[in-house]
C-alpha cells in the first residue's frame, strides 16, 4: 500500500483490511515472502488507524466547550472494558 492510498482510507476500511491480514497470518499457511509483505502492510494500516483515532480524539476535545462558549479542552477517556 502506498502512502497516498493510505491517506484516503477510512478507519473502518483500514481496520477491516488489518483484521484480514492478521487472520491470514494466524492461519500459518502464508509463504515467508508474502508474510513479510503482509506484515509491512499491516504496520502501515495500524498507523492509519492510530492517526484516524487521534484525529477523532482531537475533534472531540475541540467540540467540548464550556457554557460561556470558550473552549474547555479535556482529555478524552475511552470507556474501559473488562
Image (cartoon, rainbow, N blue to C red):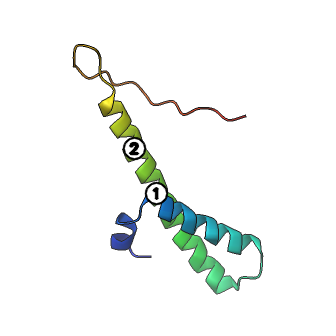
Is 33 positioned to the left or the right of 53 in the image? Answer: right
Quadrant where the image shows the N terminus? bottom left
Going 54% across and 61% down the picture, which residue do you hit? 15
Closer to the chain start, of discs 2 and 1, is 1
Gap in angstroms between the C-alphas marked 2 and 1: 10 Å
Give residue 44's position: percent from left, percent from top. Answer: 48, 66
Q: Are marks 2 and 1 in contact (CB under 8 Å)?
A: yes
- Residue farthest toward the left in the current orientation of the protein: 69
Mark 1 closeness class: few <14, some 14–19, many ≥20 residues within 10 Å: some
Q: Which residue is mark 2?
A: 56
Quadrant where the image shows the C terminus? top right
Q: Report how many numbered discs are placed on residues in the image.
A: 2
Circle 1 sits in a helix, a strand or a loop, which is it?
Answer: helix
The image shows residue 21, relative to residue 55, as above or below, that is below
Going 45% across and 47% down the picture, which residue do you hit? 53
Is 6 positioned to the left or the right of 26 in the image? Answer: left
Disc number placed over residue 11 in the picture, else none: 1
Q: Quadrant of residue 25?
A: bottom right
- Residue farthest toward the top in the current orientation of the protein: 68
Give residue 27's position: percent from left, percent from top. Answer: 77, 74
The image shows residue 28, relative to residue 55, as above or below, that is below
Circle 2 sits in a helix, a strand or a loop, which is it?
Answer: helix
- Residue farthest toward the front in the current orientation of the protein: 67
Give residue 68's position: percent from left, percent from top. Answer: 22, 13
Mark 2 closeness class: few <14, some 14–19, many ≥20 residues within 10 Å: few
Q: Quadrant of residue 4?
A: bottom left
Give residue 81's position: percent from left, percent from top. Answer: 67, 35
Going 42% across and 52% down the picture, which residue do you hit? 52
Amino acid at each position: 500500500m502506498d502512502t497516498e492510498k493510505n491517506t484516503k482510507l477510512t478507519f473502518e476500511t483500514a481496520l477491516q483490511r488489518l483484521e484480514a491480514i492478521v487472520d491470514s497470518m494466524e492461519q500459518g499457511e502464508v509463504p515467508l515472502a508474502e508474510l513479510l509483505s503482509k506484515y509491512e502492510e499491516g504496520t502501515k494500516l495500524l498507523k492509519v488507524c492510530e492517526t484516524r483515532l487521534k484525529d477523532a480524539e482531537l475533534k472531540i476535545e475541540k467540540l467540548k466547550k464550556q457554557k460561556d462558549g470558550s473552549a474547555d479542552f479535556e482529555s478524552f477517556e475511552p470507556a474501559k472494558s473488562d
